[in-house]
Structures are given as C-alpha cells and as structure tokens.
Amino acid sequence: MSERTKPERIKHLLDWKFWSRQDIRALLDLALRIKQDRREFEDRLHARTLVMLFQKTSTRTRVSFEAGMTALGGHAIHLDWRASNFTLGDIRSEARYLSRNCAFIMARVRDHADVRSMTEVATVPVINGCCNLYHPCQALADVLTIAEDRGGDPSGARLVYIGVYNNVVNSLVSICEAFDIHLTLVCPLRDDSVIDQQSRRRLLDKGLLKESLDAKESLNGAHYVYTDTWLDMEFFNDPAYADEKERRISLMLPYQINSDLLAGSQAKVMHDMPMHLGYEITEEVANGERSIIYEQSENRLHAQNAILIDLS
Ligand code: CP
C-alpha cells in the first residue's frame, strides 16, 4: 500500500478505551513473548522509522522507544517540538508531512486534542506518548509487570493507586477493565476536567473499581500499591507553581507511600517514574525489597515493542 493512500481505518493508540478487550489481551501476550525471545523479533521493523515528537520532557519514553526501534531493526528520530517547525506550522499539516517519511509517529503533547488531531490526518499509526488525559504506554507496561509477577496472567490482581487522579489513572482505569483487575483509587486530589468519566463508569459498573480516602484500609488484601507525582512534571520546579506545589504537598503528604503506611501489607510497590523521593514515596520504600519499580520502567521497552509490531 502506498503511504500516500489513506486506508479506510488506521489503527492508532490514543488510549486503551478505544481498543477491544481481545486486542489488548493479545497485545499483552505479544509483549510477554517479545520479552522472553527478543531475537525472534530483532528484524521485525527493518528499515522502518519512528518519529518521536516531544512537547514535554522525557527520560523513559524517549529512551525506551528509541532503544525499542533499534532492537526491532528500525530507527527512531527524536523531534523536539521547540526545535522543529511544529512551533511555526499548523499541527495537522506538519503531522501529515511526517506520514510521508516515517512508518510511525509517537507524540508526547500537553493537550489531548493535539494528538487526536494528528490521528485525523496521519496515514501511519500515531501513538500517544502521554498527554494531559492519557498515558497508555505506561499502563501496558504496568500490566505487563503485574502479569510477570503473577506467572503471566494479571487477571484478578488487586491494585491500589494512591495519589492524584491524573492521566496515568485514566489509562490504568481503561486497561484494568480489559484484564479484570480490581482497582482501588485513593485520590484526595481530583480535577474533574482530567477525569475520564466514561472509563471510570465502565469499571465501576463491572464492580472492579472502588474509591476511598482511607489509604491504610485500602491496602488490606492488596497485591500492588502504585503512586505517581503529585504535580505534573513540567510544573514541579516552576516558580510560578510554587504555591500550588505547597498546597498539594500539605494535602497529599498523609498519603505518602512509606514504611508506616505499608506496615502489615504485602503489597508490592509501583511508580511510573520520575519519582520525587520524600514526597509521594520515600527513598527507603522506592529502593526497598518490595519495590518492582525498575521492572516496571524496564517494561516500557517490551510493552512498546509489542505496540509497534502490532501497529506495523
Ligand atoms: N513514565 C514516563 O513516562 O517517564 P518519562 O516522563 O521519563 O518518559
């Protein structure tokens, strides 16, 4: 098929809520296979190029996608939004151009509408590398980590997320539905404008979502406890957000993942990184025996390799 012809329907990844349960489950199986037998897939994306567009900072998303394309026999181009003509041109025409010279686009943008508009014009798959509403690549890596920890099947796991209701939570909610994972949200800070109520309602209706403000009680019987930063990464060191940062620290500090909170619980500890040690999680817990945070971050690579192969 010529890249110039826009097929009827290109498969993109905006969030798991737009994928079928069957497709998401098949993707997890593929990720498990890729991780176990990397050589089988080492030439799968030979001569294919991924453009990685970043409007925001990144460590894991950039490194894991680039390393992934290398491992699969392809190539990745890092495109900093500020150093590109996305700053000058219309996003739709710039994205349309990208489709002419690359096989995939991965975009980390502030506004979900921007990545969605790219899917409307692109003639190659577009992957959401994290926007204000969703972080689907992270959620697949999270479920892969839980699956590995449970012998290959994440179904029935009891996961407690303690922190701010954010983009990571929206994608966790939608992927938990596909795997029948029991999710408890302990989110004292909720901004209605970023909550995907449709995904939340679907998980509630299936009896898989509980919401509570009692962090200690929520950990009863939990297999995993997960947290994330209390302030969006681009604001954490911004003096303009100093007051908001202080307000959030006061509100959230009682919900810190620390050894007191975890006393009596067997839950393993997860964090999508970057971590703000001493805020949402203590250094002792992050680097402690029950932490699976580095397995989780490593799994970004394997999860995304599965996404790239599936979309190719
Ligand atoms: N978790 C995550 O997306 O990490 P980066 O922001 O470093 O890419």
Image (spheres, grey):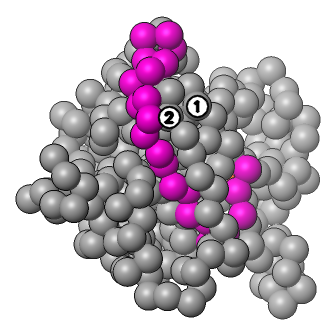
Q: Magenta stretch: residue 40 in it?
A: yes
Task: Look at 48% across and 18% down and name the residue there.
Answer: 42
Question: Relative to 156, does residue 285 appear above or below in the rendering?
Answer: below
Residue 5 in the image: state x and y as whole percent: 16, 60
303 or 239: nearer the viewer: 303
CB of mark 2 near ligand 1 (< 8 Å): no
Regarding residue 252, the answer to whether it shows in the image is: yes
Kind of residue sitting beneath label 1: Thr
Residue 307 in the image: state x and y as whole percent: 39, 38
212 or 103: nearer the viewer: 103
Q: Magenta stretch: residue 232 in it?
A: no
The Cα–Cα distance between marks 2 and 1, rounded to whole angstroms, is 5 Å
User: In the orientation shown, which residue stands out farthest toward the left?
Assistant: 8
Task: Look at 90% across and 53% down and name the residue there.
Answer: 278
Task: Look at 68% across and 43% down and name the residue there.
Answer: 63
Question: Relative to 81, does residue 139 appear above or below in the rendering?
Answer: above
Residue 96 in the image: state x and y as whole percent: 34, 72
Regarding residue 227, the answer to whether it shows in the image is: no
| Residue annotated with mark 1 | 70
| Residue annotated with mark 2 | 74
Residue 197 in the image: state x and y as whole percent: 33, 70
Question: Relative to 59, does residue 32 appear above or below in the rendering?
Answer: above
Quadrant hosting residue 233:
bottom right
243 or 39: nearer the viewer: 39
Indicate left or right for 195 with 79 as reference.
left
Quadrant of image for the C terminus: top left
Q: How many marks?
A: 2
Quadrant hosting residue 45:
top left
Q: Which residues are magenta?
A: 38-59
Secondary structure beneath disc 1? helix
Question: Relative to 192, does residue 140 appear above or below in the rendering?
Answer: above
